[in-house]
Image (cartoon, helix red, strand yellow):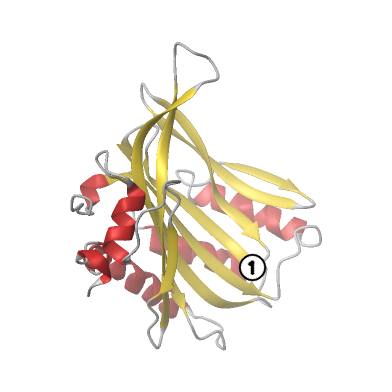
Amino acid sequence: MAEFFEFSHTKIDDHVEKIGVDIRPAIEIKLDREKLYRFGLELIDAYPHLFESLVQSPVDYRITKKFIFTGKGEAEIPTLSFTPRGLVFTFPRRLAVFGEEVELEDLDGIVVECIKKFRAKFPEKTIVRVGLVNEYVFATDGLSGARIICDRFTKLTAPVSGEVMFRMNLATDDFNRIIEVEAVRKLEQIAEIPGQIQLAGHGVKVKVDMNNRDLSKNLDYGSILNILHEARSFNKRDLYGFLNRPPGGEQ
């Protein structure tokens, strides 16, 4: 059995947060390009610290933001994009490549205001689901992520390949609470040998997707905020208890 590993906030190496908004009927980027263009400009004007550059074509629509880390570099993130399901807001919380936290204000309130602007442009659209997705990568202090996962959540021996992933839904009456856990490896370039990489460490990737189960309603703003609040509470209050459960699959 592997040495017991404790998941904690201080072990987070990388963290990205996404808020997905499912819209019915689906947006057609090509047909709705004028309204989408005006919607994007409104977001850039209102929240320049989150939305900066609009990229639009007949088949693509996204708004990006360049996050600058003094003395370390910069990263351009698509903070708003469209999928066949609807809107996806993406915000970095910690970027492993820079080793820094990204300080952002109340995102839930801003996202709701963005949804209000969207609804003003598309009053005929219905919002049936909102979900908060947190994607964490925990550095495992040199321990194999595969062994940690197998010892913690199963009675199986970790495979030689090191490839392990499982998914479960801890659903309640009101919410899907989908957790995916996967073993990952950190690779880095060997400076002295161009084109060659080496293993720099092990980790465990944890994805938590929490969203409403009832899709029969057009969600109002109070309901949207409640979904996001419950999701944040689960990540802060219950996630680590789940991840740090006793070894061997026991409760």
In the rendered view, would you say 198 is above or below 238? above
Residue positioned 34% across, 57% down in the render: 157
> As drawn, is 224 to the left or to the right of 24?
left
Q: Give the percent coordinates (x, y) of residue 163.
A: 45, 50
Q: Nearer the viewer, residue 135 or 241?
A: 241
Can residue 89 be seen in the rendering of this structure? yes
Give amino acid for label 1. Arg
Can residue 104 be seen in the rendering of this structure? no
Q: Which quadrant would the C terminus be assigned to in this image?
A: bottom left
Residue under label 1: 85
- The count of marks equals 1
Residue positioned 40% across, 32% down in the render: 97
In the rendered view, would you say 188 is above or below 166? above
Q: Nearer the viewer, residue 5 or 95?
A: 5
Residue positioned 76% across, 56% down in the render: 33
Q: Which quadrant would the N terminus be assigned to in this image?
A: bottom left
Q: Give the percent coordinates (x, y) of residue 197.
A: 48, 25
Question: Disc 1 on helix, strand or loop?
Answer: loop
Name the outermost residue toward the top. 192
Q: Quadrant of residue 175?
A: bottom left
Q: Nearer the viewer, residue 234 or 180?
A: 180
Residue positioned 21% across, 52% down in the render: 5
Q: Nearer the viewer, residue 32 or 16?
A: 16
Q: Give the percent coordinates (x, y) of residue 135.
A: 41, 54
Q: Give the percent coordinates (x, y) of residue 225.
A: 39, 73
> As drawn, is 247 to the left or to the right of 134?
left
Q: Residues within 10 Å of mark 1 (few under 14, many from 20)?
A: some
